[in-house]
Image (tube, coloured by chain):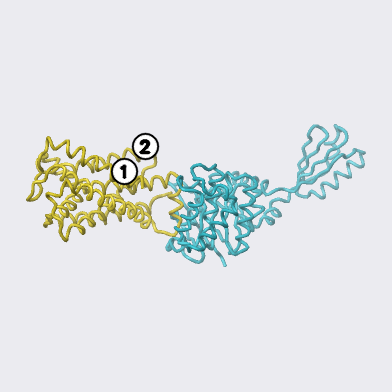
Protein backbone atom coordinates (compact mmCIF):
# COMPACT_ATOMS: atom_id res chain seq x y z
CA UNK A 1 0.00 0.00 0.00
CA UNK A 2 1.17 3.48 -0.82
CA UNK A 3 1.14 5.96 2.06
CA UNK A 4 2.00 9.02 0.00
CA UNK A 5 1.11 9.51 -3.66
CA UNK A 6 1.86 12.87 -5.19
CA UNK A 7 1.50 13.53 -8.88
CA UNK A 8 2.76 16.56 -10.84
CA UNK A 9 2.97 18.51 -7.60
CA UNK A 10 3.99 22.15 -8.00
CA UNK A 11 4.14 25.17 -5.75
CA UNK A 12 4.99 28.69 -6.90
CA UNK A 13 5.59 31.82 -4.86
CA UNK A 14 5.29 35.05 -6.84
CA UNK A 15 6.00 33.22 -10.09
CA UNK A 16 9.02 31.39 -8.67
CA UNK A 17 8.64 27.60 -8.61
CA UNK A 18 9.72 26.23 -5.24
CA UNK A 19 8.51 22.76 -6.20
CA UNK A 20 8.19 21.86 -9.85
CA UNK A 21 5.95 19.04 -10.99
CA UNK A 22 7.29 16.33 -8.70
CA UNK A 23 5.99 12.78 -8.37
CA UNK A 24 6.37 10.87 -5.12
CA UNK A 25 5.33 7.43 -4.02
CA UNK A 26 6.07 6.21 -0.52
CA UNK A 27 5.21 2.67 0.57
CA UNK A 28 3.74 1.87 3.98
CA UNK A 29 6.09 0.75 6.74
CA UNK A 30 9.15 2.28 5.08
CA UNK A 31 11.47 5.17 5.81
CA UNK A 32 11.59 7.48 2.84
CA UNK A 33 14.52 9.87 2.80
CA UNK A 34 14.16 13.20 1.10
CA UNK A 35 17.50 14.81 0.44
CA UNK A 36 18.51 18.07 -1.08
CA UNK A 37 20.70 21.09 -0.57
CA UNK A 38 19.39 24.15 1.28
CA UNK A 39 16.53 25.79 -0.59
CA UNK A 40 15.99 22.75 -2.83
CA UNK A 41 12.28 22.50 -1.96
CA UNK A 42 12.33 19.91 0.86
CA UNK A 43 10.43 21.98 3.43
CA UNK A 44 7.96 23.28 0.83
CA UNK A 45 7.25 19.67 -0.16
CA UNK A 46 6.66 18.73 3.49
CA UNK A 47 4.34 21.71 3.92
CA UNK A 48 2.40 20.58 0.85
CA UNK A 49 2.16 16.98 1.98
CA UNK A 50 1.10 17.95 5.50
CA UNK A 51 -1.64 20.30 4.17
CA UNK A 52 0.00 23.37 5.66
CA UNK A 53 0.00 25.05 2.23
CA UNK A 54 -2.02 24.38 -0.90
CA UNK A 55 -0.29 23.34 -4.12
CA UNK A 56 -0.37 25.51 -7.23
CA UNK A 57 -1.14 22.34 -9.20
CA UNK A 58 -1.01 18.57 -8.85
CA UNK A 59 -2.60 15.95 -6.63
CA UNK A 60 -1.72 14.57 -3.20
CA UNK A 61 -3.07 11.41 -1.64
CA UNK A 62 -2.04 10.62 1.91
CA UNK A 63 -3.04 7.23 3.36
CA UNK A 64 -5.51 6.93 0.50
CA UNK A 65 -7.19 10.28 1.25
CA UNK A 66 -7.21 13.30 -1.02
CA UNK A 67 -5.14 15.75 1.04
CA UNK A 68 -6.40 18.80 -0.86
CA UNK A 69 -10.06 17.98 -0.34
CA UNK A 70 -9.85 16.39 3.11
CA UNK A 71 -6.94 18.04 4.91
CA UNK A 72 -8.37 17.59 8.40
CA UNK A 73 -8.86 13.83 7.95
CA UNK A 74 -5.25 13.60 6.77
CA UNK A 75 -3.91 15.63 9.68
CA UNK A 76 -5.71 13.37 12.16
CA UNK A 77 -3.61 10.45 10.92
CA UNK A 78 -0.18 12.02 10.55
CA UNK A 79 2.46 13.46 12.82
CA UNK A 80 4.73 16.30 11.81
CA UNK A 81 8.00 17.55 13.25
CA UNK A 82 8.71 20.75 11.40
CA UNK A 83 12.19 22.05 10.76
CA UNK A 84 11.72 25.22 12.77
CA UNK A 85 11.85 24.97 16.56
CA UNK A 86 8.45 25.01 18.24
CA UNK A 87 7.92 25.14 21.98
CA UNK A 88 5.94 26.83 24.68
CA UNK A 89 8.49 28.76 26.70
CA UNK A 90 6.76 28.71 30.07
CA UNK A 91 5.86 25.01 30.10
CA UNK A 92 8.09 22.33 31.59
CA UNK A 93 9.31 19.44 29.43
CA UNK A 94 6.82 17.08 31.03
CA UNK A 95 3.91 19.51 30.73
CA UNK A 96 4.77 20.17 27.08
CA UNK A 97 4.39 16.50 26.23
CA UNK A 98 1.26 16.20 28.37
CA UNK A 99 -0.32 19.23 26.71
CA UNK A 100 0.51 17.84 23.30
CA UNK A 101 -1.14 14.55 24.29
CA UNK A 102 -4.19 16.53 25.42
CA UNK A 103 -4.29 18.36 22.08
CA UNK A 104 -4.33 14.99 20.36
CA UNK A 105 -6.99 13.69 22.72
CA UNK A 106 -4.83 10.82 23.94
CA UNK A 107 -6.53 8.68 26.58
CA UNK A 108 -5.52 9.86 30.10
CA UNK A 109 -4.08 6.55 31.28
CA UNK A 110 -2.24 5.92 28.04
CA UNK A 111 -0.97 9.48 28.16
CA UNK A 112 0.80 8.91 31.49
CA UNK A 113 2.55 5.78 30.25
CA UNK A 114 3.58 7.38 26.99
CA UNK A 115 4.97 10.48 28.65
CA UNK A 116 7.15 8.28 30.87
CA UNK A 117 8.24 6.18 27.88
CA UNK A 118 9.22 9.25 25.88
CA UNK A 119 11.01 10.93 28.77
CA UNK A 120 13.09 7.81 29.05
CA UNK A 121 13.59 7.12 25.30
CA UNK A 122 14.73 10.69 24.63
CA UNK A 123 16.77 10.97 27.82
CA UNK A 124 14.61 13.76 29.20
CA UNK A 125 14.09 12.40 32.72
CA UNK A 126 16.61 14.71 34.37
CA UNK A 127 15.15 17.81 32.78
CA UNK A 128 11.47 16.89 32.98
CA UNK A 129 10.68 19.79 35.35
CA UNK A 130 12.77 22.35 33.48
CA UNK A 131 10.97 25.03 31.50
CA UNK A 132 11.45 25.02 27.72
CA UNK A 133 12.85 28.53 27.91
CA UNK A 134 15.72 27.23 30.05
CA UNK A 135 16.68 24.37 27.73
CA UNK A 136 19.52 24.25 25.24
CA UNK A 137 18.69 24.13 21.52
CA UNK A 138 19.42 20.39 21.38
CA UNK A 139 17.26 19.66 24.43
CA UNK A 140 14.38 21.65 22.97
CA UNK A 141 14.70 19.73 19.73
CA UNK A 142 14.56 16.45 21.63
CA UNK A 143 11.37 17.57 23.37
CA UNK A 144 9.91 18.68 20.03
CA UNK A 145 10.57 15.30 18.45
CA UNK A 146 9.61 13.29 21.55
CA UNK A 147 6.19 14.91 21.98
CA UNK A 148 5.22 13.94 18.41
CA UNK A 149 5.38 10.28 19.38
CA UNK A 150 2.83 10.78 22.17
CA UNK A 151 -0.11 10.32 19.80
CA UNK A 152 -1.12 7.54 17.44
CA UNK A 153 -0.38 8.03 13.76
CA UNK A 154 0.18 6.06 10.59
CA UNK A 155 2.66 8.40 8.97
CA UNK A 156 5.25 10.74 10.43
CA UNK A 157 7.00 13.61 8.68
CA UNK A 158 10.37 14.48 10.16
CA UNK A 159 11.91 17.62 8.71
CA UNK A 160 15.59 17.60 9.66
CA UNK A 161 14.83 16.25 13.15
CA UNK A 162 18.45 15.84 14.23
CA UNK A 163 19.51 19.47 13.74
CA UNK A 164 21.21 20.63 16.93
CA UNK A 165 21.51 17.16 18.46
CA UNK A 166 24.78 15.71 19.69
CA UNK A 167 25.92 12.40 18.11
CA UNK A 168 24.60 10.22 20.91
CA UNK A 169 21.18 11.93 20.98
CA UNK A 170 21.10 11.70 17.20
CA UNK A 171 21.77 7.98 17.25
CA UNK A 172 19.15 7.41 19.98
CA UNK A 173 16.59 9.29 17.92
CA UNK A 174 17.37 7.36 14.74
CA UNK A 175 17.16 4.07 16.61
CA UNK A 176 13.84 5.07 18.16
CA UNK A 177 12.55 5.94 14.69
CA UNK A 178 13.70 2.53 13.41
CA UNK A 179 11.90 0.85 16.29
CA UNK A 180 8.67 2.68 15.46
CA UNK A 181 8.96 1.69 11.81
CA UNK A 182 9.31 -1.95 12.83
CA UNK A 183 6.00 -1.46 14.69
CA UNK A 184 4.36 -0.31 11.45
CA UNK A 185 4.91 3.45 11.22
CA UNK A 186 5.84 5.05 7.89
CA UNK A 187 8.37 7.89 7.96
CA UNK A 188 9.04 10.70 5.53
CA UNK A 189 12.43 12.00 6.56
CA UNK A 190 14.33 15.01 5.28
CA UNK A 191 17.94 15.60 6.11
CA UNK A 192 21.13 16.85 4.61
CA UNK A 193 23.22 14.57 6.80
CA UNK A 194 23.79 11.75 4.36
CA UNK A 195 25.12 9.21 6.86
CA UNK A 196 21.72 9.48 8.55
CA UNK A 197 19.90 8.80 5.31
CA UNK A 198 22.17 5.86 4.59
CA UNK A 199 21.69 4.46 8.10
CA UNK A 200 17.94 4.94 8.20
CA UNK A 201 16.24 5.06 4.83
CA UNK A 202 14.79 2.29 2.71
CA UNK A 203 14.38 4.62 -0.22
CA UNK A 204 15.80 8.02 -1.05
CA UNK A 205 14.71 10.85 -3.31
CA UNK A 206 17.08 13.66 -4.16
CA UNK A 207 15.57 17.03 -4.89
CA UNK A 208 17.35 20.02 -6.36
CA UNK A 209 15.89 23.35 -7.49
CA UNK A 210 12.37 22.03 -6.90
CA UNK A 211 12.82 18.95 -9.10
CA UNK A 212 13.42 15.35 -8.12
CA UNK A 213 16.62 14.23 -9.76
CA UNK A 214 16.79 10.65 -8.45
CA UNK A 215 14.69 8.14 -6.51
CA UNK A 216 15.94 4.74 -5.40
CA UNK A 217 17.24 2.65 -2.53
CA UNK A 218 20.58 3.79 -1.09
CA UNK A 219 22.25 0.62 -2.45
CA UNK A 220 20.85 1.10 -5.93
CA UNK A 221 21.84 4.76 -5.94
CA UNK A 222 25.37 3.68 -5.11
CA UNK A 223 25.31 0.98 -7.78
CA UNK A 224 24.01 3.35 -10.41
CA UNK A 225 25.84 6.51 -9.58
CA UNK A 226 28.64 5.35 -7.31
CA UNK A 227 30.51 2.87 -9.50
CA UNK A 228 33.48 5.15 -9.41
CA UNK A 229 35.95 4.14 -6.71
CA UNK A 230 38.99 5.94 -5.39
CA UNK A 231 42.29 4.05 -5.18
CA UNK A 232 45.16 5.49 -3.18
CA UNK A 233 48.65 4.03 -3.72
CA UNK A 234 51.58 5.12 -1.62
CA UNK A 235 54.79 4.24 -3.47
CA UNK A 236 58.21 3.91 -1.88
CA UNK A 237 60.10 6.33 -4.14
CA UNK A 238 59.50 9.40 -6.27
CA UNK A 239 59.47 8.53 -9.98
CA UNK A 240 59.40 11.36 -12.48
CA UNK A 241 58.51 8.98 -15.30
CA UNK A 242 55.40 7.65 -13.52
CA UNK A 243 52.95 9.56 -15.68
CA UNK A 244 54.68 8.25 -18.80
CA UNK A 245 54.58 4.69 -17.47
CA UNK A 246 50.83 4.89 -16.74
CA UNK A 247 49.99 6.50 -20.07
CA UNK A 248 48.62 3.32 -21.63
CA UNK A 249 45.80 2.92 -19.11
CA UNK A 250 42.39 4.38 -20.00
CA UNK A 251 39.16 5.23 -18.18
CA UNK A 252 40.63 6.81 -15.08
CA UNK A 253 41.60 10.12 -13.50
CA UNK A 254 44.91 10.38 -11.72
CA UNK A 255 46.48 12.83 -9.31
CA UNK A 256 50.08 12.77 -8.10
CA UNK A 257 50.28 14.14 -4.55
CA UNK A 258 53.78 14.92 -3.23
CA UNK A 259 55.29 12.54 -5.77
CA UNK A 260 54.76 9.36 -3.72
CA UNK A 261 50.96 9.25 -3.36
CA UNK A 262 48.88 8.43 -6.42
CA UNK A 263 45.11 8.95 -6.26
CA UNK A 264 43.16 7.24 -9.02
CA UNK A 265 39.42 7.54 -9.65
CA UNK A 266 37.83 5.10 -12.05
CA UNK A 267 34.52 3.42 -12.90
CA UNK A 268 36.39 0.19 -13.77
CA UNK A 269 38.58 0.34 -10.69
CA UNK A 270 39.44 -3.40 -10.60
CA UNK A 271 40.85 -3.39 -14.18
CA UNK A 272 42.68 -0.13 -13.66
CA UNK A 273 44.15 -1.30 -10.35
CA UNK A 274 45.43 -4.56 -11.91
CA UNK A 275 47.08 -2.69 -14.77
CA UNK A 276 48.73 -0.18 -12.43
CA UNK A 277 50.01 -2.93 -10.13
CA UNK A 278 51.45 -4.72 -13.17
CA UNK A 279 53.26 -1.59 -14.34
CA UNK A 280 54.57 -0.83 -10.84
CA UNK A 281 55.84 -4.43 -10.45
CA UNK A 282 57.48 -4.54 -13.89
CA UNK A 283 59.23 -1.25 -13.19
CA UNK A 284 60.18 -2.38 -9.67
CA UNK A 285 58.43 0.47 -7.96
CA UNK A 286 57.78 -0.51 -4.31
CA UNK A 287 54.26 -0.11 -2.92
CA UNK A 288 54.09 0.96 0.74
CA UNK A 289 50.33 1.22 1.13
CA UNK A 290 47.22 0.71 -0.97
CA UNK A 291 43.55 1.44 -0.26
CA UNK A 292 40.31 1.32 -2.26
CA UNK A 293 37.50 3.63 -1.08
CA UNK A 294 33.97 3.09 -2.42
CA UNK A 295 31.99 6.23 -3.25
CA UNK A 296 29.85 7.40 -0.35
CA UNK A 297 26.26 8.54 -0.64
CA UNK A 298 27.57 12.01 0.09
CA UNK A 299 29.76 11.98 -3.01
CA UNK A 300 26.88 10.66 -5.11
CA UNK A 301 24.65 13.38 -3.73
CA UNK A 302 27.18 16.12 -4.41
CA UNK A 303 27.84 14.85 -7.92
CA UNK A 304 24.16 14.59 -8.74
CA UNK A 305 23.37 18.05 -7.42
CA UNK A 306 26.36 19.46 -9.32
CA UNK A 307 25.27 17.73 -12.54
CA UNK A 308 21.70 18.83 -12.01
CA UNK A 309 22.81 22.42 -11.52
CA UNK A 310 24.86 22.19 -14.70
CA UNK A 311 22.07 20.75 -16.81
CA UNK A 312 18.32 21.14 -16.45
CA UNK A 313 18.12 17.95 -14.32
CA UNK A 314 16.39 14.84 -15.60
CA UNK A 315 14.66 12.26 -13.45
CA UNK A 316 16.66 9.12 -12.91
CA UNK A 317 15.00 5.94 -11.76
CA UNK B 1 -4.07 33.64 36.88
CA UNK B 2 -1.80 36.69 36.77
CA UNK B 3 -3.62 37.84 33.68
CA UNK B 4 -7.01 37.41 35.34
CA UNK B 5 -5.88 39.43 38.36
CA UNK B 6 -4.59 42.18 36.06
CA UNK B 7 -7.85 42.09 34.09
CA UNK B 8 -9.72 42.94 37.29
CA UNK B 9 -7.23 45.40 38.81
CA UNK B 10 -6.79 47.40 35.60
CA UNK B 11 -10.49 48.40 35.24
CA UNK B 12 -10.79 48.92 39.01
CA UNK B 13 -8.15 51.62 38.75
CA UNK B 14 -10.28 53.28 36.08
CA UNK B 15 -13.46 52.85 38.13
CA UNK B 16 -12.16 54.02 41.48
CA UNK B 17 -9.49 56.51 40.45
CA UNK B 18 -10.82 58.01 37.20
CA UNK B 19 -14.43 57.44 38.26
CA UNK B 20 -14.15 59.43 41.47
CA UNK B 21 -11.61 61.94 40.16
CA UNK B 22 -13.87 62.92 37.26
CA UNK B 23 -16.88 63.23 39.54
CA UNK B 24 -15.73 66.79 40.23
CA UNK B 25 -16.19 67.54 36.52
CA UNK B 26 -18.99 65.16 35.59
CA UNK B 27 -21.70 64.91 38.21
CA UNK B 28 -24.29 63.00 36.29
CA UNK B 29 -24.53 61.25 32.97
CA UNK B 30 -27.83 61.04 31.11
CA UNK B 31 -28.59 57.44 30.24
CA UNK B 32 -31.94 56.48 28.67
CA UNK B 33 -34.55 57.76 31.10
CA UNK B 34 -32.10 57.85 34.03
CA UNK B 35 -29.30 60.00 35.28
CA UNK B 36 -26.30 57.98 36.46
CA UNK B 37 -23.50 59.25 38.62
CA UNK B 38 -20.16 59.02 36.82
CA UNK B 39 -18.62 56.14 38.85
CA UNK B 40 -21.71 54.04 38.07
CA UNK B 41 -21.48 54.99 34.38
CA UNK B 42 -17.77 54.17 34.06
CA UNK B 43 -18.07 50.96 36.13
CA UNK B 44 -20.67 49.61 33.72
CA UNK B 45 -18.57 50.80 30.77
CA UNK B 46 -15.56 49.00 32.21
CA UNK B 47 -17.36 45.65 31.99
CA UNK B 48 -17.67 46.06 28.21
CA UNK B 49 -14.21 47.55 27.94
CA UNK B 50 -12.80 44.59 29.84
CA UNK B 51 -14.43 42.06 27.54
CA UNK B 52 -12.75 43.81 24.60
CA UNK B 53 -9.45 44.19 26.41
CA UNK B 54 -9.33 40.45 27.19
CA UNK B 55 -9.47 39.66 23.50
CA UNK B 56 -6.27 41.62 22.95
CA UNK B 57 -4.68 38.63 24.58
CA UNK B 58 -6.14 36.40 21.89
CA UNK B 59 -3.94 38.28 19.41
CA UNK B 60 -0.97 38.05 21.75
CA UNK B 61 -1.50 34.28 22.12
CA UNK B 62 -1.44 33.83 18.34
CA UNK B 63 1.54 36.14 18.03
CA UNK B 64 3.46 34.19 20.68
CA UNK B 65 2.52 30.92 18.98
CA UNK B 66 4.03 32.31 15.78
CA UNK B 67 7.13 33.57 17.56
CA UNK B 68 7.83 30.20 19.15
CA UNK B 69 6.90 28.08 16.15
CA UNK B 70 3.75 26.66 17.75
CA UNK B 71 1.45 28.33 15.23
CA UNK B 72 2.50 26.13 12.29
CA UNK B 73 2.75 23.11 14.58
CA UNK B 74 -0.85 23.60 15.71
CA UNK B 75 -1.99 24.11 12.13
CA UNK B 76 -0.65 20.67 11.17
CA UNK B 77 -2.53 19.21 14.15
CA UNK B 78 -5.96 17.57 14.12
CA UNK B 79 -7.92 20.82 14.01
CA UNK B 80 -9.34 23.22 11.46
CA UNK B 81 -8.12 26.79 11.37
CA UNK B 82 -11.56 27.99 12.47
CA UNK B 83 -11.26 25.76 15.54
CA UNK B 84 -7.89 27.30 16.32
CA UNK B 85 -9.30 30.84 16.31
CA UNK B 86 -12.41 29.73 18.17
CA UNK B 87 -10.37 28.00 20.88
CA UNK B 88 -8.44 31.21 21.53
CA UNK B 89 -11.61 33.28 21.53
CA UNK B 90 -13.27 30.73 23.82
CA UNK B 91 -10.41 30.87 26.34
CA UNK B 92 -10.39 34.64 26.30
CA UNK B 93 -14.19 34.77 26.38
CA UNK B 94 -14.19 32.79 29.62
CA UNK B 95 -11.60 35.15 31.12
CA UNK B 96 -13.69 38.10 29.91
CA UNK B 97 -16.80 36.66 31.54
CA UNK B 98 -15.08 35.92 34.84
CA UNK B 99 -13.50 39.36 34.98
CA UNK B 100 -16.83 40.96 34.01
CA UNK B 101 -18.45 39.07 36.90
CA UNK B 102 -15.74 40.20 39.31
CA UNK B 103 -15.99 43.83 38.17
CA UNK B 104 -19.76 43.69 38.57
CA UNK B 105 -19.31 42.37 42.10
CA UNK B 106 -16.65 44.92 43.05
CA UNK B 107 -18.35 47.79 41.21
CA UNK B 108 -21.79 46.98 42.61
CA UNK B 109 -21.53 49.47 45.51
CA UNK B 110 -21.01 52.18 42.89
CA UNK B 111 -23.98 51.50 40.71
CA UNK B 112 -26.35 49.86 43.22
CA UNK B 113 -28.46 53.04 43.39
CA UNK B 114 -29.23 52.93 39.69
CA UNK B 115 -29.07 49.20 39.07
CA UNK B 116 -32.17 47.42 37.89
CA UNK B 117 -31.39 43.75 37.62
CA UNK B 118 -34.11 41.81 35.88
CA UNK B 119 -34.61 38.62 33.91
CA UNK B 120 -32.65 40.09 30.95
CA UNK B 121 -29.57 41.18 32.92
CA UNK B 122 -27.57 37.95 32.76
CA UNK B 123 -28.60 37.01 29.18
CA UNK B 124 -27.64 40.49 27.95
CA UNK B 125 -24.24 40.48 29.70
CA UNK B 126 -23.53 36.92 28.50
CA UNK B 127 -24.61 37.84 24.95
CA UNK B 128 -22.31 40.87 25.01
CA UNK B 129 -19.43 38.74 26.33
CA UNK B 130 -19.82 36.06 23.67
CA UNK B 131 -20.31 38.32 20.66
CA UNK B 132 -17.71 40.79 21.94
CA UNK B 133 -15.13 38.03 22.44
CA UNK B 134 -15.74 36.62 18.97
CA UNK B 135 -15.77 40.04 17.30
CA UNK B 136 -12.70 41.53 18.96
CA UNK B 137 -10.94 38.15 19.10
CA UNK B 138 -11.37 37.85 15.32
CA UNK B 139 -9.95 41.35 14.81
CA UNK B 140 -6.98 40.47 17.03
CA UNK B 141 -6.51 37.19 15.12
CA UNK B 142 -6.52 38.98 11.77
CA UNK B 143 -3.92 41.48 12.98
CA UNK B 144 -1.68 38.86 14.56
CA UNK B 145 -1.68 36.53 11.56
CA UNK B 146 -1.08 39.23 8.93
CA UNK B 147 1.76 41.16 10.52
CA UNK B 148 5.29 39.86 10.32
CA UNK B 149 7.29 41.94 12.78
CA UNK B 150 6.70 42.22 16.51
CA UNK B 151 7.10 46.03 16.31
CA UNK B 152 4.41 46.19 13.62
CA UNK B 153 2.14 43.93 15.64
CA UNK B 154 2.50 46.04 18.79
CA UNK B 155 1.96 49.34 16.99
CA UNK B 156 -1.09 48.18 15.03
CA UNK B 157 -2.83 46.28 17.82
CA UNK B 158 -2.31 49.08 20.34
CA UNK B 159 -3.50 51.75 17.88
CA UNK B 160 -6.58 49.79 16.88
CA UNK B 161 -7.52 48.95 20.44
CA UNK B 162 -6.82 52.50 21.60
CA UNK B 163 -9.31 53.70 19.00
CA UNK B 164 -11.84 51.13 20.14
CA UNK B 165 -11.37 52.06 23.80
CA UNK B 166 -11.56 55.83 23.59
CA UNK B 167 -13.79 56.46 20.57
CA UNK B 168 -16.66 54.71 22.30
CA UNK B 169 -19.24 55.25 25.00
CA UNK B 170 -17.26 53.19 27.51
CA UNK B 171 -15.83 56.28 29.24
CA UNK B 172 -18.27 59.02 28.31
CA UNK B 173 -21.73 59.33 26.76
CA UNK B 174 -22.30 60.19 23.10
CA UNK B 175 -24.70 62.94 24.14
CA UNK B 176 -22.84 66.21 24.49
CA UNK B 177 -19.82 65.08 22.45
CA UNK B 178 -19.11 66.95 19.17
CA UNK B 179 -21.41 65.59 16.47
CA UNK B 180 -18.65 64.04 14.36
CA UNK B 181 -17.18 62.30 17.41
CA UNK B 182 -20.59 61.12 18.57
CA UNK B 183 -21.11 59.63 15.11
CA UNK B 184 -17.68 57.99 15.21
CA UNK B 185 -18.70 56.30 18.46
CA UNK B 186 -21.28 54.35 16.48
CA UNK B 187 -18.71 53.06 14.00
CA UNK B 188 -17.13 51.30 16.92
CA UNK B 189 -18.43 47.89 18.05
CA UNK B 190 -17.35 48.61 21.63
CA UNK B 191 -20.11 51.24 21.83
CA UNK B 192 -22.70 48.58 20.98
CA UNK B 193 -21.12 46.14 23.42
CA UNK B 194 -21.15 48.68 26.26
CA UNK B 195 -24.71 49.76 25.47
CA UNK B 196 -25.90 46.14 25.68
CA UNK B 197 -24.09 45.61 29.01
CA UNK B 198 -25.58 48.83 30.41
CA UNK B 199 -29.02 47.83 29.17
CA UNK B 200 -28.63 44.63 31.19
CA UNK B 201 -27.40 46.33 34.35
CA UNK B 202 -29.68 49.35 34.33
CA UNK B 203 -32.72 47.56 32.96
CA UNK B 204 -33.42 49.70 29.92
CA UNK B 205 -33.69 47.15 27.13
CA UNK B 206 -35.44 48.71 24.14
CA UNK B 207 -35.64 48.34 20.37
CA UNK B 208 -32.42 50.36 19.84
CA UNK B 209 -30.54 47.96 22.12
CA UNK B 210 -32.11 45.10 20.17
CA UNK B 211 -30.76 46.61 16.98
CA UNK B 212 -27.34 47.03 18.57
CA UNK B 213 -27.41 43.34 19.52
CA UNK B 214 -28.19 42.46 15.92
CA UNK B 215 -25.23 44.58 14.72
CA UNK B 216 -22.96 42.86 17.26
CA UNK B 217 -24.15 39.40 16.24
CA UNK B 218 -23.72 40.12 12.51
CA UNK B 219 -20.37 41.82 13.07
CA UNK B 220 -19.01 38.91 15.08
CA UNK B 221 -20.13 36.36 12.46
CA UNK B 222 -18.69 38.40 9.56
CA UNK B 223 -15.37 39.05 11.30
CA UNK B 224 -15.05 35.45 12.45
CA UNK B 225 -15.62 34.19 8.89
CA UNK B 226 -13.11 36.76 7.61
CA UNK B 227 -10.50 35.76 10.21
CA UNK B 228 -10.95 32.08 9.36
CA UNK B 229 -10.80 32.70 5.59
CA UNK B 230 -7.69 34.83 5.91
CA UNK B 231 -6.05 32.24 8.11
CA UNK B 232 -6.91 29.49 5.61
CA UNK B 233 -5.32 31.44 2.81
CA UNK B 234 -2.27 32.40 4.82
CA UNK B 235 0.94 31.26 3.09
CA UNK B 236 3.20 29.80 5.74
Query: Are the two marked residues, 2 and 1, in contact with CB atoms closer than 8 angstroms?
Result: no
A234 with respect to A27 (left or right)? right
Tell which of B69 and A300 is nearer to you.
B69
The reply to whether residue A307 is visible in this rendering is yes
Q: Farthest residue toward the left?
A: B33
As drawn, A205 above or below A303: below
User: x and y percent of residue B15 in the render?
Assistant: 21, 42
Number of the front mark, 2 or 1: 1
Chain of the residue that carries numbered disc 1 in the rendered image: B
As drawn, A281 above or below A171: above
Which quarter shows the C terminus of chain A?
Answer: bottom right
B102 with respect to A153 (left or right)? left
User: x and y percent of residue A211 in the render?
Assistant: 55, 51
Residue at image point 88% right, 35% down: A236
Q: Colour of chain A?
A: cyan
Which quarter shows the N terminus of chain A?
Answer: bottom right
Residue at which label 2 appears: B151
> Which mark, residue B6?
1
Q: Secondary structure at mark 2?
A: helix
B173 with respect to A294 (left or right)? left
Crowding at label 2, few (<14), some or many (≥20) Cα neighbours within 10 Å?
A: few
Q: Colour of chain B?
A: yellow
User: x and y percent of residue A11 in the render?
Assistant: 47, 52
Amino acid sequence: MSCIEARSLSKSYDGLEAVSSIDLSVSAGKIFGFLGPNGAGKTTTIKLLTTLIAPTSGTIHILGMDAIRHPLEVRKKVGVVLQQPSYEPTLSVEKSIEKYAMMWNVDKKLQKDRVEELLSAFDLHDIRKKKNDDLSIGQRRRVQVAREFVHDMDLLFLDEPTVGLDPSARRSLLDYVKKKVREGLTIFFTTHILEEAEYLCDEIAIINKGKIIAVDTPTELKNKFGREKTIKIHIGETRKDLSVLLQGIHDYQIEYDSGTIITIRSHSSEDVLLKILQILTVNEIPIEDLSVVPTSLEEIFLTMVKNSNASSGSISK
Amino acid sequence: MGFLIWQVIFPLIYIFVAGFAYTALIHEVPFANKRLDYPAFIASGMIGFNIMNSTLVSGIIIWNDRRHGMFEQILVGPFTRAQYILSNVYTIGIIGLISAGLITAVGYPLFFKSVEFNILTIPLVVFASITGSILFGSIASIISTRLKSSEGFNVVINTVFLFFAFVSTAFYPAEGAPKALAMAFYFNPLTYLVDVVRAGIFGNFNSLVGLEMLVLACGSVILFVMATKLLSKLEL
